[in-house]
Image (tube, rainbow, N blue to C red):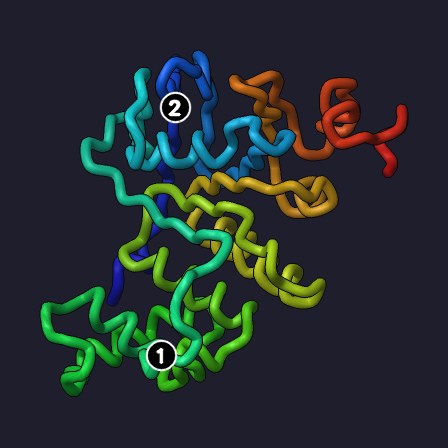
Amino acid sequence: MTDLHKECHCSVKIEHLSVTRGNQKILDDVNLEVKHGEITAIIGRNGAGKTTLLKAIMDRIPHTGTVTYFNSMGKKISQPKLGYVPQSLSFDRGTPLTVADLFCANSGMMPVWFRHKKDKLAHAKEMLAHVGAERLIDKPLGRISGGELQRVLLAFALDPMPDMLILDEPVSALDRRGISSFYDLVTSLRSEYHMPVLLVSHDLGHVTKYCTRAALVDGTIVLTDTAKNILKHKEVREVFGLGEEGIL
């Protein structure tokens, strides 16, 4: 049984987070809380600092302030596990690397060209099954569709079960069917395992349909509200060029 079978009742508190690059302050005094079972969207104009915020939360870039994780009892988690799904994965489309190679290389020390152990393959199949992608295990990465690849990356992000799932515009390269399929999958995982999800999106339709809360970023957190109410704010309508009623 994998870690995915345990419930995740983690919450995340971001306090006074700032990022400076050279003499320029990219983010200033960001404060945000993402509770368990919530899908919180980070929205804003291009260059507002959305991806920078994700990188700081993942400790991939220098920053000040704190990012604290709490379990269901309110105790701090000292070494949180983060699952991350990027916009896309850059690789040579002609590579013979298979989905199984990707998973087994991550969970072992053996080179990918060695035959995979049965237990590693079984584990990879189990993780892929959680996202409905077990049939892809023997396919080369370069021969699966964009939607299939995002499912594989999501399965990868869930191994081991994360305390928070971070999605950086994960459907930007998908068609409408792929987008619905991916977000339906994410919402079902959130409902089942109660993990907090932090999502960067530029599509307000996706935000209002799939997310529970949203935060407008422009160098800092300008405002937060429920996803259903976010279009009511003048600041959001101005950033996205919406009319008074929040309609394109």
Please report the residue visible at 57 percent of the width from the left and 36 percent of the height from the top.
Answer: 41
Residue behind mark 1: 95
Residue drawn where x is 63% and y is 30% of the image: 44
Q: Could you tell me if the residues under marks 2 and 1 are in contact, i.e. CB atoms within 8 Å?
A: no
Q: Is residue 185 left or right of residue 239?
A: left
Q: Please rate how many residues cluster around mark 2, counting C-alpha atoms within 10 Å: few if below 14, some from 14 to 19, many from 20.
A: some
Residue at image location 22% in from the left, 73% down from the top: 104
Query: Which of the marked residues, 2 or 1, is nearer the chain's N terminus?
Result: 2
Question: What residue sits right under mark 2 in the picture?
Answer: 13
State the residue in front, 243 or 48: 48
Image height check: is 78 above or below 102?
above
184 or 138: nearer the eye? 138
Which is more foreground, mark 2 or mark 1?
Answer: 1
Calculate the distance from the C-alpha at mark 2 to the C-alpha at mark 1.
40 Å
Q: Is residue 216 above or below residue 106?
A: above
On the rendered structure, is 4 left or right of 35?
Answer: left
Disc 2 marks a residue whose amino acid type is Lys
Query: Where on the picture, by quarter, is residue 110?
Result: bottom left
Q: Residue furthest front?
A: 22
Position of residue 15 measured from the top left corner of the image (x, y, whole percent): 38, 16
Question: Depth check: 220 or 73 in front?
Answer: 220
